[in-house]
Image: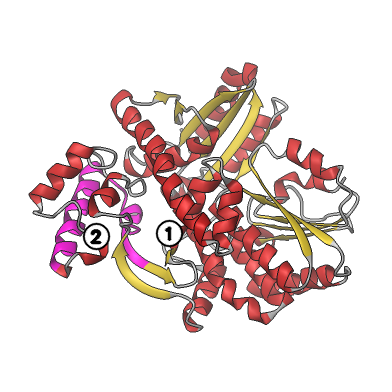
């Protein structure tokens, strides 16, 4: 329950404040939008409290990075948006450790040096009701109530983890209401369109992905001519009638493609503008994802702490990042996906992009009946990202278990959420892994 989160957050704050101000506190976080915002909240809260800190953003698999951290001789390590899945290794670090996570946990009880705050252990669903950033926000407030001004970052993290699908709820809704009440966020109902021009906004539309429009210059031009709209028109300059006409046309494209209602409901929905971040939360989360997954993790952290030059640089890099995704999506639409009994899969060039591509594809290209796996072969390892949907989860799909169990049997690592997860194994076990995952998901979905 939320009161457990508050109680544990106060306990975490007490641990932090027990260390002298001369302590350099280590922060380790995930490299997606939720992980970056969580790290930024913790970094700013520690800085305001008078502490030095060293922040690192990591990508899966974490073990190599954690082995380096273990050798650093840290006094206090704070893990944000990760840690519960790596707890057995973390317990060997021989220092005080705080874990703040919302992914599947390995065990409830920890050694005395480790405080684990996991949403799922507090009666809060980590898939939909709380994320790394909203949980860290609670600790920031426990350190100092003035840290409520970091609420925009917290909700950007929840947005980046797609926890708005089905409506913001649970602990996330508590944080959102606080942000609205205190004037840090403003609500409006709109479609996601961002770019220097209307043409750019439509061409670089990744999520939602508009088949025949996204990444297709000819398709964008024909649509704008059909609607009698100037391609150089700025999104904010659209009249209410023009906006209504464009919204209807884009929604029709998605309906024709067979998108699920809960996904359609996310297209035109309540959105939240943050003056401190300089844009709408989903657009901000997209920007951070392009930094973290595009190989510029430190840039994403700089964006979060208000570096205007970093923000401009990130906007330029975001186009290249989105172009890579669009190229892959268009290719998959043409070539199709490979199949097993219980899932579909495809091979991607970069593991950091595979999950993003899979998430978009399952919502806007494929039907709802099977999850989708992205496979990347790199340095002798198979990196797997998998995505499901709420319909499949309601039928029993648990990708976190499937990834963890299949990888465990092959001496690999896996885990995550029921709806989205990942794994890393030796590439020589690829066929065995796919067979194991197929068997597990078939049982889950009773196929």
Main secondary-structure element of the magenta-colored stretch: helix
Using residue 421 as the reference point, say whether residue 15 is left or right of it: right
Q: Which mark is residue 282?
A: 1
Give residue 317's position: percent from left, percent from top.
45, 45
In the image, residue 250 lies in the stretch drawn in magenta: yes
Closer-to-camera residue (201/373): 201
| Disc 2 crowd, CA 10 A, few/some/many (<14, 14-19, 20+) | some
Q: Which residues are magenta?
A: 241-270
Q: Is residue 443 visible?
A: no
| Disc 1 crowd, CA 10 A, few/some/many (<14, 14-19, 20+) | many
- Residue at (59%, 20%) from the top-left corner? 430
As measured in the structure, the alpha-carbon distance from the residue carrying label 1 to the one carrying label 2 is 19 Å
Give residue 87's position: percent from left, percent from top.
78, 47
- Residue at (53%, 44%) from the top-left corner? 420
Which residue in the rendered view is the most extreme toward the top? Answer: 428
Instruction: Say above or below: 370 vs 81.
Output: above
Q: Nearer the viewer, mark 1 or mark 2?
A: 2
Using residue 428 as the reference point, say whether residue 411 is left or right of it: right
Q: Secondary structure at mark 2?
A: loop
Contact (CB < 8 A) between labels 1 and 2?
Answer: no
Disc 2 designates what residue? Answer: 234
């Amino acid at each position: 329950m939320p009161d457990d989160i508050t109680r544990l957050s106060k306990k975490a704050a007490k641990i932090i404040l027990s260390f002298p101000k001369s302590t350099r506190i280590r922060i380790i976080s995930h490299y997606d939008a939720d992980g970056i915002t969580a790290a930024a909240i913790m970094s700013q809260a520690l800085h305001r409290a008078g502490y030095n800190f060293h922040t690192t953003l990591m990508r899966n698999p974490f073990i190599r990075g954690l082995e380096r951290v273990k050798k650093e001789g840290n006094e206090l390590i704070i893990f944000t948006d990760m840690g519960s899945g790596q707890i057995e290794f973390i317990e060997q670090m021989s220092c005080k450790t705080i874990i703040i996570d919302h992914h599947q946990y390995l065990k409830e009880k920890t050694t005395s040096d480790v405080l684990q705050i996991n949403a799922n252990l507090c009666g809060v669903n980590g898939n939909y009701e709380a994320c790394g950033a909203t949980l860290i926000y609670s600790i920031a407030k426990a350190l100092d109530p003035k840290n409520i001004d970091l609420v925009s970052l917290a909700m950007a993290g929840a947005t980046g983890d797609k926890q708005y699908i089905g409506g913001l709820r649970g602990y996330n809704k508590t944080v959102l209401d606080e942000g609205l009440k205190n004037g840090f966020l403003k609500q409006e109902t709109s479609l996601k369109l961002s770019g220097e021009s209307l043409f750019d906004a439509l061409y670089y539309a990744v999520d939602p992905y508009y088949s025949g429009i996204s990444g297709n210059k000819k398709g964008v031009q024909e649509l704008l001519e059909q609607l009698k709209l100037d391609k150089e028109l700025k999104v904010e300059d659209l009249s209410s009638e023009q906006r209504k006409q464009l919204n209807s046309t884009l929604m029709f494209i998605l309906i024709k493609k067979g998108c699920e209602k809960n996904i359609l409901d996310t297209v035109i929905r309540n959105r939240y503008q943050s003056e401190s971040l300089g844009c709408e939360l989903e657009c901000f989360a997209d920007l951070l994802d392009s930094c973290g997954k595009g190989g510029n993790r430190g840039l994403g952290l700089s964006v979060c702490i208000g570096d205007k030059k970093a923000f401009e640089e990130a906007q330029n890099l975001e186009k290249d990042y989105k172009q890579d995704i669009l190229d892959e999506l268009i290719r998959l639409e043409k070539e199709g996906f490979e199949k097993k009994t219980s899932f579909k899969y495809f091979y991607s060039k970069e593991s950091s992009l595979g999950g993003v591509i899979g998430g978009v594809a399952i919502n806007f290209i494929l039907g709802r009946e099977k999850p989708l796996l992205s496979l990347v072969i790199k340095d002798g390892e198979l990196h797997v990202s998998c995505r499901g949907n709420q319909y499949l989860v309601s039928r029993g799909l648990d990708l976190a278990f499937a990834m963890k169990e299949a990888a465990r049997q092959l001496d690999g690592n896996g885990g995550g959420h029921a709806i989205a997860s990942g794994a890393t194994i030796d590439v020589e076990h690829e066929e065995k892994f796919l067979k194991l995952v197929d068997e597990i998901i078939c049982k889950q979905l009773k196929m």
